[in-house]
């Protein structure tokens, strides 16, 4: 297996060149990578900078790397609202790695989160000046100070296995998904959304997001507020292969929930992420099995209309958009699960819904990718 051994010093030199304009990079992404497959005897874990501009001579290549401890098992990258810090979650150790991304080289600190097992997602409340970390293994949400990163409190969830989290400061609400038991040898799925009030930390309500009898196996994964929609509207992805809506009711100050679309009827399962285009009239939804990117017309966001499904690869998960918005780069891997850990980055034409290419740099090196985000200076650095 080809092994990348770029040192931090070399990475810093490359990054300084990028910052100074010394390289021809037009669009750089950060990916979290790890050794692919069950054999982890020579495990690698780290952050890589990858060129996504197809006109660049180093298109698809690794520009620099920042290695992480092999035992860390990096999972996701989340930028704070100001884009000055990047929070990297860990599936295996009770910590956050927080990177200062305002200058090169990126320097990090470790934030201990002792109550956290299987760290998943991070969300931010600017109104409260706090961050919130979901911990799927210990069924809690850790709350921290967004300025100092001091841990402030731990909130036990009434529905187990929290994963996705979305915050809306104007209505003072958070939604947290109850996804799956990470320790069970046989699948054990959640089926609920928990609603919290960030200003008080109070748990307000719990809502089932399935029309099937309990236990439904729905497995809600993520929740996303649709940008620019009033009253606020949330898209929720379910592992079972469905898309649900949560509609804010200003009169009662509560959400109502309903199913919007069944991706399993298209032969797709493990629905994961939602991304929105700049114009606000398209939503793109990934499903990991067998691996697709779906486009929805959301001109009427209350009634998303399915347009097409593009074949990506096993584990289709996160994505970033090209600078002109014409392409999506889809990262293909979910938790390094066999059959859903392809390790490639699929290039999808968003006009035609066709796959036009594949970046196999990591796959060919015996690695797989856990997430992809643009660097924070990008106009749209949607993280997760």
Image (spheres, grey):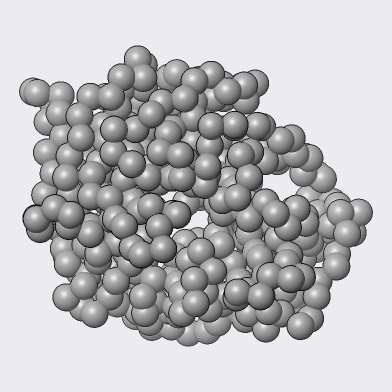
Query: Residue 174 at x, y = what percent?
Result: 32, 31
Q: Residue, x 22% and y 70% (percent of image)?
A: 263
In which quarter of the view is residue 303 placed?
Answer: bottom left
Q: Residue, x 77% and y 56% (percent of image)?
A: 67
Q: Kindly tell me whether residue 378 is visible in this rendering.
A: no
Which residue is more in the foreground, 321 or 122?
122
Q: Can you say whether 132 is above or below 362 in the image?
A: above
Query: Total marks drawn?
Result: 0
In which quarter of the view is residue 70 placed?
Answer: bottom right
Q: Residue, x 31% and y 57% (percent of image)?
A: 188
Q: Going by the image, does 205 lie left or right of 109? A: left
Which residue is more in the foreground, 267 or 37?
37
Q: Can you say whether 227 is above or below 76 in the image?
A: above
Q: Kindly tell me whether residue 163 is visible in this rendering.
A: yes
Q: Can you say whether 72 is above or below 240 in the image?
A: above
Query: Residue 315 at x, y = what percent?
Result: 45, 72
């Amino acid at each position: 297996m080809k092994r990348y051994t770029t040192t931090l010093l070399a990475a810093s030199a490359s990054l300084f060149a990028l910052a100074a304009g010394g390289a021809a990079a037009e669009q750089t992404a950060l990916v979290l990578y790890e050794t692919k497959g069950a054999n982890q005897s020579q495990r690698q874990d780290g952050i890589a900078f990858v060129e996504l501009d197809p006109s660049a001579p180093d298109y698809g290549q690794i520009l620099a790397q920042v290695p992480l401890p092999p035992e860390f098992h990096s999972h996701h990258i989340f930028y704070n609202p100001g884009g000055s810090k990047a929070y990297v979650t860990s599936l295996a150790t009770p910590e956050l790695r927080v990177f200062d991304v305002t200058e090169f080289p990126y320097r990090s600190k470790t934030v201990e989160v002792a109550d956290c097992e299987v760290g998943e997602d991070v969300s931010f409340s600017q109104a409260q000046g706090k961050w919130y970390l979901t911990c799927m293994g210990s069924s809690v949400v850790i709350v921290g100070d967004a300025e100092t990163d001091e841990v402030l409190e731990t909130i036990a969830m009434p529905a187990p296995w929290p994963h996705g989290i979305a915050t809306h400061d104007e209505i003072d609400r958070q939604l947290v998904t109850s996804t799956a038991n990470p320790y069970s040898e046989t699948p054990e799925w959640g089926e609920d959304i928990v609603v919290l009030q960030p200003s008080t930390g109070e748990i307000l309500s719990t809502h089932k997001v399935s029309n099937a009898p309990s236990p439904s196996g729905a497995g809600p994964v993520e929740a996303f507020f649709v940008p620019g929609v009033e009253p606020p509207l949330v898209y929720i992805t379910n592992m079972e292969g469905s898309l649900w809506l949560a509609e804010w009711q200003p009169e009662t100050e509560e959400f109502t929930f309903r199913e919007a679309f069944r991706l399993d009827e298209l032969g797709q399962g493990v629905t994961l992420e939602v991304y929105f285009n700049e114009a606000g009239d398209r939503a793109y939804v990934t499903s990991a099995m067998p691996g697709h990117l779906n486009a929805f017309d959301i001109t009427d966001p209350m009634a998303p209309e399915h347009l097409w499904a593009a074949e990506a690869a096993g584990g289709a998960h996160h994505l970033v958009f090209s600078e002109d918005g014409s392409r999506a780069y889809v990262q293909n891997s979910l938790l390094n699960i066999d059959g859903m850990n392809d390790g490639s980055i699929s290039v999808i034409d968003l006009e035609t819904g066709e796959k036009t290419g594949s970046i196999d740099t990591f796959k060919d090196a015996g690695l797989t990718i856990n997430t992809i985000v643009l660097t924070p200076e990008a106009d749209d650095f949607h993280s997760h």
